[in-house]
Structures are given as structure tokens and as C-alpha cells.
Image (cartoon, rainbow, N blue to C red):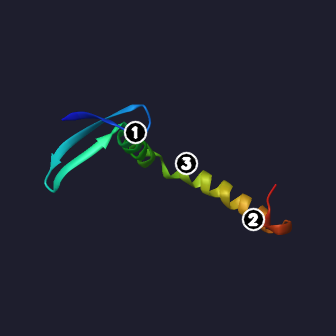
Amino acid sequence: MARKINTTSTKVKEKWGIKTDKGHRYFDEGHIRASELRRELEKRPIEELWKRNNVEANIFQLGCHLKNGKSK
């Protein structure tokens, strides 16, 4: 079932709903995009995630040795 609702802005937002065991679940395009992004992030290999953590750890270590906890 699809329906259009008015938001506080002048844009019309389209929403959909599905029936579940617990009742109804309503969602819009933003929910669909967020779900797709979560699925893509789950597919990323662990090595790629480690790279980001290593960079953040290095930046943190540099920040500890400068004045006022700042980093360059």
C-alpha cells in the first residue's frame, strides 16, 4: 500500500506500508536508502575496516603529544 503525505515543507513524501506479524511497518525512501547502506557496509571485508581504525589510532597518538590535545 502506498500513500503520499504532506510534511512541514512543501514537498510531498511518499510512504509505503507492509503488514507484519506485530502489526504494520511503514517506511519511506530514506529508510530504503539506509537499509541498502547497512547491507553494503556489512559486505565490506574486515581488512578494509582495519585500515580506517589504524588511521584513526595514528591520528589519536599524534594528538596526545601536541599542546592542548590537538592534532595536525
Q: Position of residue 61 (x, y in %)?
A: 75, 65
Q: Secondary structure at mark 3?
A: helix
- Return the residue nearer the eye: 8 or 42: 8
Residue at (61% x, 57% y) in the render:
53
Q: Looking at this view, is 15 or 63 the one in front?
A: 15
Picture disc at residue 48? 3
Nearer the observer, disc 3 or disc 2?
2
Mark 1: give few (<14), some (14-19) or many (20+) Cα within 10 Å.
Answer: few
The answer for how far apart the CA atoms under marks 1 and 2 are is: 35 Å
User: Residue drawn 78% across and 63% down?
Assistant: 63
- The amino acid pointed to by label 1 is Arg
Mark 3 → mark 2, Cα distance in angstroms: 21 Å
60 sits left or right of 5 in the view = right
Front tag of 1 and 2: 1
Sequence-earlier tag: 1 or 2: 1
The residue at which mark 2 appears reads as 61
Badges 3 and 2: C-beta atoms under 8 Å apart?
no
Q: Quadrant of the N terminus?
A: top left
Question: In the figure, 42 relative to 6: above or below?
Answer: below
Looking at the image, residue 17 sits to the left or right of residue 46; the answer is left
**Is there CB contact under 8 Å for labels 1 and 2?**
no
Q: Secondary structure at mark 2?
A: helix
Residue 6 found in image quarter: top left
According to the picture, the residue beneath numbered tag 1 turns out to be: 33
Looking at the rendered structure, the kind of residue marked 3 is Glu
In this view of the protein, which residue sits in the foreground, 24 or 49?
A: 24
Q: Which circle marks residue 4 in the picture? A: none
Please tell me which residue is depicted at 16% across the width and 57% down the height of the picture: 22
Which residue shows up at 22% across the image and 33% down it?
Answer: 2
Q: Secondary structure at mark 1?
A: helix
